[in-house]
Every structure is written in structure tokens, then in C-alpha cells.
């Protein structure tokens, strides 16, 4: 089996006896001729391998580096990443495009080798012991679309057969998962091409839930969805946690990280800048209010009253308390400036933590 994480080519099934290297990666296409082949590496853990080494956390990364070569040039995607992920939680890698989020996810999912450092999943090393990891994970890459299957029901059921279920058990798991993901019965046998992007993502999550993978990797799961579809998808991702699954997802949507995460990991230029519970990260800020200046305005003298984020336009001024925020707003109003004030959020944690170390030029 071959896998190309970046391109979206995610599973090629080969007949029994051919070499294969992948785990459960739900993606754009499957060989229709071989969809019911019972692949050895997907049929469940080998009797000769330990299911898990009795360690916590589920995932641990120690000083992980990844360097790519582009001709004579070296590009460093990860720079000494250290991370622990606990069982039964949703952890979000949050950062801009190109921050290194997907690179780390691919390494943890045994799809890419690190240049340096160690990653252990379920106590197994991703380089030396990938097989027992692959038996227990599921990956939904960015923009994955199961479009070559005629219907949601056939797609989810086929995934279960691939993992070694008998047809009766595969049917039971499929029905339960489709219902749990609130996919209406009237679309179970409808063409996948006719479904919305959000509904197709729910079908992918149903396949993961039915497969009973212990660790799920989601790469930008809601990208391209409208706000309503995105929020509906968030509730379905949360259901994975309710079923005891551990989830590692990547996103550049601040609100997505705030809503879903037990822990947020702020990633910028391949480095982990900050990590913690979303609410605790926000509470840890010295600044409690943010004033957004939305019109042309002179900010002279305001740096003495609050912290000015020179990212504009628009410009942001941070205040320590409501009294200071009111004073700044009064000054801006007298100058004829348009501005709005709001409590700080996770976006401000990211902005200020990166600014503290690298300056606003790097945002």
C-alpha cells in the first residue's frame, strides 16, 4: 500500500501477499477491485505483538526535528518539538499554514521519518516499531474525500471489512456509526458525490468511529466548510472523545481550537511556543482586553496606557483591566478614531507569545 499524505492519494489496496506499509488512512480513493481484501496489517493486532506498552501518555515527542532538502537548500520544518498527549483527550496543533503542524502529524502517524528526535505512540517508537502503532490509529488527511464509493453505507462498511470484520459485524458497526454521527438514513445509500462537504467529513468520521481506532489524526478537518457546517462537524469530532478516543488535530482556526481542545499547542515556524488548556492560556495573559482600531488614527502616547500590537492595519491595543480599556477608548473617541473593545482570546495568546520572542514581523 502506498500513501501520499500531501497530495491526497491516501490508500491503494493490494491483493493478499503483496507488501504493504500503511495503516488506516481514509482518503480520496480505493481500488474497487480489491476493496474486500482482508489486509494483514489492517486485520487487527498480531498475536505475537504486545497491544500496548503500559505507559502514559498515548503520544510522546522528544526533541523532534525535520529537515527537508530542496536542491542545495535545506528547509527546517520542525525545530526541537517536545509534546505529550494524554489518553482520551483532544489536542490541537494551532498555527499558521507552513508552521509544521502537518509535518508533525505525519511523523506521529508513521508516514514520515523524523530527521532527529524520538516519537513514541502507545509506547512504540515510530521509526523502529511502526506496525503496532498502525494497527491502532486512523488518519483523515486534509481534504480527504471518499468519492469513488457509491454511498456512505458502502464506504463505512468496506473499511470495517478491510480491518477484518465479518460482514454481519461490519454491518452492525456501520449502522451504529452512521447513526452516532447523525447521518440521515435517507442519504445512507445516496451517491457520495451528491453530499455536501460537511456531510462527507461526517462519513469519514463515521468510518473512524466504526473502526474503533484508539488514536485519530485529523489534519485541518474543517477547512473549506462554511461556519454552520464547521460547527456541526465540531460536535461530531467531540463524539470521538466521548467514545474514549484520543484525537490529535491540526488547525489554523482559533475558534476551532478553543471549542474542541483539552489542550492547545501553539506552533510557529516549527517550534512549540506555548501549550495548555485554552481557557488557562487566555487567563495567563497580563492583558485582559483588546481594543481594535479600525480606522486611520494616530496612536501617539497610547503605548504608555496599554500594549500596542503593531500588526496593522487594523491595530490592536491591549489593556490590563476594564478601567484602562475605558480610558483608551475615551482617548480614541476624542481623536475621531473608530474602535471596538473585547475580552482577549486564544488568538491574542498566539499573537503576543510569538511577538514576545520574534516580533510582529514574523506573524
Image (cartoon, rainbow, N blue to C red):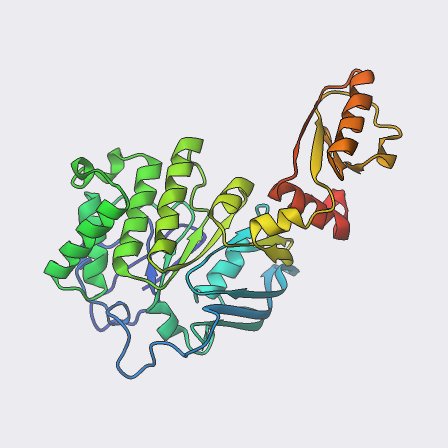
For image coordinates 18% across by 47% down, the residue present is 153
- Residue furthest to the left: 168
Location of the N terminus (image quadrant): bottom left
Above-or-below relation of 15 to 231: below
Q: Relative to 48, is 106 above or below?
A: above
User: Residue at 62% of width from left, 42% of height from top?
Assistant: 347
Looking at the image, residue 272 sits to the left or right of residue 223; the answer is right
Q: Residue furthest front?
A: 323
User: Quadrant of the image for the C terminus?
Assistant: top right
Which is more toward the observer, 13 or 293?
293
Q: Position of residue 324 (x, y in %)?
A: 79, 33
Q: Where is residue 6 drawn, in percent x and y?
A: 45, 52
Position of 20 with respect to 8 (left or right) is left
Identify the residue at image location x=78%, y=18%: 333
Rendered residue at 49%/44% (across/down): 259
Residue 130 x %, y %: 40, 73
Q: Nearer the viewer, residue 79 or 324?
A: 324
The answer to whether 155 appears left or right of 108 in the picture is: left
Residue 100 image offset from top left, x and y in percent: 57, 55
Task: State whether residue 297 appears in this view.
Answer: no
Residue 43 showing in the rendered view: yes
Nearer to me, 200 or 34: 200
Q: How many marks?
A: 0
Amino acid at each position: 500500500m502506498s500513501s501520499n499524505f500531501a497530495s491526497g492519494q491516501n490508500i491503494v489496496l493490494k491483493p493478499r501477499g503483496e507488501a504493504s506499509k500503511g495503516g488506516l488512512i481514509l482518503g480520496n480513493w480505493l481500488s474497487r477491485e480489491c476493496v474486500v481484501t482482508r489486509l494483514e496489517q489492517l486485520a487487527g493486532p498480531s498475536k505475537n505483538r504486545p497491544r500496548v506498552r503500559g505507559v502514559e501518555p498515548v503520544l510522546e515527542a522528544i526533541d523532534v526535528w525535520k529537515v527537508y532538502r530542496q536542491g542545495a537548500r535545506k528547509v527546517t520544518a520542525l525545530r526541537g518539538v517536545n509534546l505529550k498527549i494524554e489518553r482520551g483527550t483532544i489536542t490541537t496543533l494551532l498555527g499558521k499554514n507552513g508552521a509544521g503542524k502537518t509535518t508533525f502529524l505525519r511523523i506521529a502517524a508513521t508516514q514520515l521519518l523524523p530527521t532527529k528526535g524520538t516519537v513514541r505512540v502507545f509506547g512504540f517508537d515510530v521509526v523502529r516499531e511502526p506496525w503496532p502503532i498502525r494497527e491502532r490509529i486512523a488518519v483523515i488527511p486534509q481534504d480527504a474525500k471518499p468519492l469513488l464509493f457509491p454511498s456512505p453505507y458502502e464506504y463505512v462498511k468496506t473499511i470495517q471489512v478491510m480491518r477484518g470484520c465479518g460482514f454481519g459485524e461490519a454491518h452492525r458497526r456501520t449502522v451504529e456509526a452512521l447513526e452516532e454521527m447523525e447521518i440521515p438514513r435517507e442519504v445512507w445509500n445516496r451517491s457520495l458525490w451528491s453530499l455536501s462537504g460537511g456531510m462527507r467529513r461526517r462519513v469519514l468520521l463515521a468510518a473512524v468511529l466504526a473502526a474503533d481506532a484508539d488514536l485519530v489524526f485529523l489534519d485541518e478537518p474543517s477547512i473549506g466548510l462554511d461556519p454552520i457546517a464547521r460547527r456541526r462537524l465540531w460536535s461530531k469530532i467531540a463524539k470521538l472523545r466521548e467514545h474514549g478516543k484520543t484525537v490529535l488535530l491540526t488547525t489554523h482556526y482559533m475558534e476551532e481550537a478553543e471549542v474542541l481542545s483539552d489542550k492547545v499547542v501553539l506552533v510557529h515556524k516549527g517550534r512549540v511556543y506555548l501549550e495548555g488548556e485554552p481557557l488557562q492560556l487566555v487567563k495567563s495573559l497580563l492583558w485582559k482586553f483588546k481594543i481594535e482600531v479600525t480606522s486611520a488614527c494616530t496612536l501617539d502616547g497610547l503605548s504608555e496606557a496599554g500594549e500596542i500590537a503593531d500588526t496593522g492595519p487594523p491595530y490592536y491595543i491591549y489593556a490590563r483591566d476594564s478601567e484602562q480599556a475605558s480610558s483608551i477608548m475615551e482617548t480614541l473617541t476624542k481623536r475621531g478614531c473608530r474602535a471596538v473593545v473585547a475580552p482577549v482570546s486564544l488568538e491574542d495568546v498566539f499573537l503576543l507569545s510569538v511577538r514576545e520572542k520574534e516580533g510582529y514581523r514574523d506573524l
